[in-house]
């Protein structure tokens, strides 16, 4: 009986949250640059700085099917830009999360336990063959995050 109880239990990996290192910042910046490469100088100046401009850039690249499902790095670069929208619009911050499985960039709402992992938000959907609308994806996740934030207050 004890064995069955132990098999039914799941161990939750302990997570350690830390600030981004200089190398982490450089890696995220390289992925941002990969996406900015597709924009004209005017769009970089006029549109991209806004949240709507970033989401519009993502939508255009996704609709053009610019990256194939096996281009994980590039798809995760789209996720970096999506993450920047959460930072810009909702007050999240970039952090690194370490656990028994590795170390990954994430977004944390202030110093709360609310974490988002935007690098995989687009990539996993594309890899599964789904059609992704950047605006709808952002709004859906943002609403879930707002609900979790309200629950903390």
Image (tube, rainbow, N blue to C red):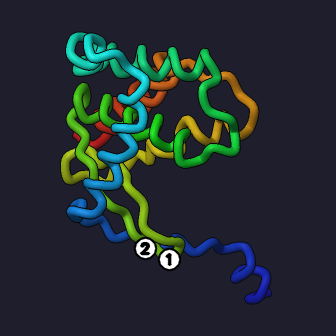
Badge 1 local density, few (<14 within 10 Å), some, or many (20+)? few
Question: On the picture, is 59 further left or further right than 147?
Answer: right
Identify the image quadrant of residue 32: top left
> Which of the pair 68/21 is nearer the observer?
68
Residue 75's mark?
Answer: none
Badge 2 local density, few (<14 within 10 Å), some, or many (20+)? few
Question: Under tag 2, what secondary structure?
Answer: loop
Between circles 1 and 2, the one closer to the viewer is: 1
Identify the image quadrant of residue 66: top right
In the image, is residue 41 above or below residue 25? above
Question: Under tag 1, what secondary structure?
Answer: loop
Quadrant of the drawing holding the C terminus: top left
Residue at point 61% right, 32% down?
A: 67
In the image, is residue 40 above or below residue 72? above
For marks 1 and 2 on the same chain, the one whose residue lies earlier in the sequence: 2
Query: In x, y percent, where is residue 52?
Result: 33, 14
In the image, is residue 77 above or below residue 6? above
Determine the CA span between mark 1 and mark 2: 7 Å
> Which of the pair 100/24 is nearer the observer?
24
Q: How many marks?
A: 2
Residue at point 51% right, 24% down?
A: 137
> Which of the pair 141/103 is nearer the observer?
103
Residue 14's mark?
Answer: 2
Asked if the residue under mark 2 is in contact with the one under mark 1, i.e. CB atoms within 8 Å, the reply is: yes
Quadrant of the drawing holding the N terminus: bottom right
Query: In x, y percent, where is residue 134?
Result: 50, 21
Query: In x, y percent, where is residue 92?
Result: 25, 40
Query: In x, y percent, where is residue 97?
Result: 37, 63
Residue at point 59% right, 40% down?
A: 123
Residue at point 39% right, 70% down?
A: 98
Identify the image quadrant of residue 88: top left
Residue under numbered circle 1? 100
């Amino acid at each position: 009986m004890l064995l069955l109880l132990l098999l039914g239990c799941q161990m939750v990996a302990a997570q350690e949250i830390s600030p981004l290192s200089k190398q982490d910042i450089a890696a995220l910046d390289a992925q941002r640059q990969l996406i900015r490469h597709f924009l004209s100088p005017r769009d970089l100046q006029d549109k991209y700085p806004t949240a709507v401009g970033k989401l519009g850039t993502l939508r255009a690249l996704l609709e053009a099917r610019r990256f194939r499902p096996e281009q994980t790095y590039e798809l995760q670069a789209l996720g970096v830009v999506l993450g920047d929208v959460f930072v810009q619009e909702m007050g999240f911050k970039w952090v690194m999360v370490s656990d028994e499985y590795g170390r990954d960039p994430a977004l944390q709402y202030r110093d709360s336990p609310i974490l988002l992992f935007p690098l995989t938000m687009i990539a996993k959907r594309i890899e599964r063959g789904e059609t992704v609308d950047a605006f709808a994806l952002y709004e859906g996740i943002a609403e879930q995050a707002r609900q979790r934030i309200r629950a903390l207050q």
